Amino acid sequence: MIARRDLLLLPALLAAGPALAAAPRVVTILGDSITAGYGLSAAQAFPARLQDALTKAGAQVLIRPAGVSGDTTAGGLARVDFSVQSDTALCLVALGGNDLLQGVDPKRTAANLDAIITRLQKRRIQVILAGLKPPPAIGRAYAQEFTGLYARLAKAHHLTLYPDLLAGVGPGLRQHDGLHPNAQGAQVIAAGLTPVVLAALKAR
């Protein structure tokens, strides 16, 4: 027998049902200045462009950028538990560019990323790892070792790899420093990531 109190609460519960069902899944982007939108407005940066693209695709997703300019993988490891909040369903780890620019030993970069991924997976947070391709000016041996670490980590942790965060972002789509994407470049990054994020969310 249903109590009178329950009958009184039923309309409110029914009304809340669709809202609860439509609660967006949080996608956190743990990154550096590219994620933070260096030189761009928040609306121009790739996290906002990715949010727009996913929304247009019908995904119930909230993109939460957690980018810190100048951050290395060591910095990301130091703040991962704070920056990636407990409601995160999926984390895009987009770090390593500053390690590359500073000439950090790729073994140290790999160890930091490994620790970040391990912490996230222990928290049952799905991970996409975004790699980077060193510019031609970087020494060949160093570049090969650096590039290869992302694929090795993705394989070891059984996670999705997006091989190059800046894929398709040529010189004309970068700012004057030649490193950071301009507004059009940020759009290219978002377009490349959209199907990857959608597939990962679908598979979860």
Image (tube, rainbow, N blue to C red):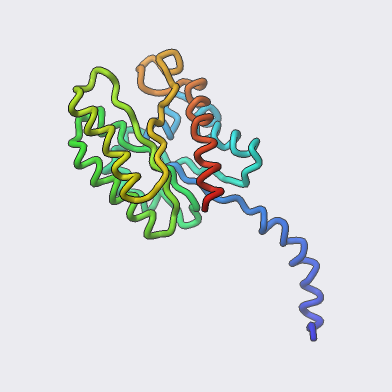
The image quarter containing residue 139 is top left
Q: Quadrant of the N terminus?
A: bottom right
Residue 59 image offset from top left, x and y in percent: 62, 44
7 relative to 94 in the view: left or right? right
Q: Nearer the viewer, residue 128 or 98?
A: 128
The image quarter containing residue 147 is top left
The residue at the point 78 percent across, 71 percent down is: 10
15 relative to 160 in the view: left or right? right
Residue 111 image offset from top left, x and y in percent: 23, 46
The image shows residue 69, relative to residue 199, as above or below, that is above
Number of callouts: 0
Residue 25 visible in the snapshot: yes
The image shows residue 194, relative to residue 12, as above or below, that is above
158 relative to 60 in the view: left or right? left
The residue at the point 24 percent across, 40 percent down is: 109
Residue 62 image offset from top left, x and y in percent: 56, 45
The residue at the point 38 percent across, 30 percent down is: 164
108 relative to 16 in the view: left or right? left
Residue 31 visible in the snapshot: no
Residue at the bottom extreme?
1
Residue 137 image offset from top left, x and y in percent: 24, 18
The image shows residue 18, relative to residue 96, as above or below, that is below
